[in-house]
Amino acid sequence: MTLMLRDISRTFTTEKGETIEALSRISLEVRDQEFICILGPSGCGKTTILRIIAGLESATSGTISINGTTITQPSPQMAMIFQEYSLYPWRNVQDNVTLGLELRGMKKAEREERAKNYLELMGLKGFERSFPYELSGGMRQRVAVARALAIDPSILLMDEPFGALDAQTRNRMQHELLHIWQKTKKTILFVTHSVDEAVFLADRIVVLTRRPGTIREIVTVPGERPRERTGEPFVRIRRHLLDMINEESGAVQ
Amino acid sequence: MTRRLGLVLPLLLIFGWEAAAIIINNPFYLPRLESVIPVLLNPFSTDFTLGTGSLVDNALVSIERVTIGFGIAAAVAIPLGIGMGRSSRINDFFDTTIEMLRPVPPLAWVPLALAWFKLGIASIVFIIFIGSVFPILLNTIDGVRSVKKTWIEVGTTLGASERQVLSCIIVPGAAPTIWTGLRVGFGIAWMCVVAAEILPGPTSGLGYLIMYAYNQGQMNVIVAGMITIGLIGLAIDILFKIVERRFFSWRGLDR
């Protein structure tokens, strides 16, 4: 499964009639089972890239293709995980996870059977009948991941999925995500503004410039996982990334 | 404890009423408790409601009318509200007209209702419709607009069609607010049916019964009728609340 972004640009028109260029000529080839993090200063359009890939917004120009086939609307090969508030509060955990299957017309018994594996994988066993408001932030994101996995996409699009969690939960979720990635062999595109998170997770980190977002550099992170967050050469890579982000944010060193 | 506290004022009112009735000592101003209670305790009897149906007969007629008028109002207001909540074009098309019609009290429609539908159930149903359609409509619009954008986007990325987005996300997401609209709408519908029945024309219904009793000088029947109107309204509101607690409690708990 290869995902290709070719010359993706996106302009917005504000109410005053001004044209704002959010993304400019983004080209990227994502390899099968690769873990890519998209990193950039706030407002650089990193979420917009993900939304365009997911089919929630359209690019002003450029094409997106999966295995050579251009896609223009939400593809069943992809599932998106949002930062928060994405669970349906009137559905219990199981019914949230099986929604994608329900929408495809799968029978109740069959979809619950299929959801079982993913609930187990995400450590949600025993919580099938719980409602979202009964769960902690970390548990809720587990449900969101299980729901995305349940439709068996080859690509997971994750938009700062751990951004609203406390540091400890966030670390644990990162570990779990790597485990799931290795087990399910998905391709992951992960948007974050955390350098630490990107270095811990990614095979390659796509660093964006400030608006209009373009690719400034693609940094390959070497090394087996799980990585030692404070070890060499990650400190060096982190330093390099931080320098770029600070520069793009216009921060004074 | 709160429940018990809620009973204090009704009891005081009953005592105050009885005391006042004894002092006034004129059943044409204020009937005494012991003349009202038998009417309420024999709701199937026509002994008290001289020459017209029993309390229960009249209550059933009123409930039937209100159900029809309210049902039509819901059938119109919910789809229209979903359309207006979803599409700004539909909203722009209807909004001005609705905001202009909404302040007109339901009873101001009575002359037109009589001209169009003549005396009979149709004009009463029409008044009830006018009374209950706006709260249901406005709450439906609000409910649809309160559906989080992320909920819809999740559905879209999971492959939901337009219809599935509507049936699996928008309608259940808006349901608690729509239910509030139905509850408010039914309360108004119940007031409208009694008001419409008091007007000349109908020969049955709780509103008719209390007007009829007035003409007969039967103050105890009037008060019994009023208590019945209040109790039925209360009972229906409790039913609405039970359903709300059972199915829509997530709204208050959602974070």
Image (spheres, rainbow, N blue to C red):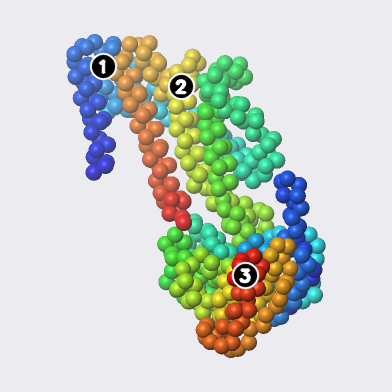
Q: Residue at x 42, y 30 (%)?
A: B60
Q: Amino acid at mark 1?
A: Pro
**Could you say which is closer to the camera, residue B234 or residue A210?**
A210
Kindly identify which chain the residue marked by label 1 belongs to: B
Mark 1: give few (<14), some (14-19) or many (20+) Cα within 10 Å.
Answer: many
Q: Which residue is mark 2?
A: B195
Q: Residue at x 49, y 76 (%)?
A: A171
Q: Amino acid at mark 3?
A: Asn
Does residue B180 sit above or below B220 in this rendering?
below
**Could you say which is closer to the camera, residue B15 or residue A197?**
A197
Say if mark 3 contacts mark 2, CB within 8 Å. no
What residue occupies the far front of the structure in this picture? A253
**Could you say which is closer to the camera, residue B225 or residue B161?**
B161
Q: Residue at x 52, y 32 (%)?
A: B132
For residue A37, what is the image quadrant? bottom right
Residue A150 drawn at (x, y percent): 58, 71
Kindly identify which chain the residue marked by label 2 belongs to: B
| Residue A246: numbered disc | 3
- Judge from the rendering whether residue B116 lies leftward or rightward of residue B29; answer left or right: right
Q: Amino acid at mark 2?
A: Ala
| Residue A1: numbered disc | none
**Could you say which is closer to the camera, residue A224 or residue B176?**
A224
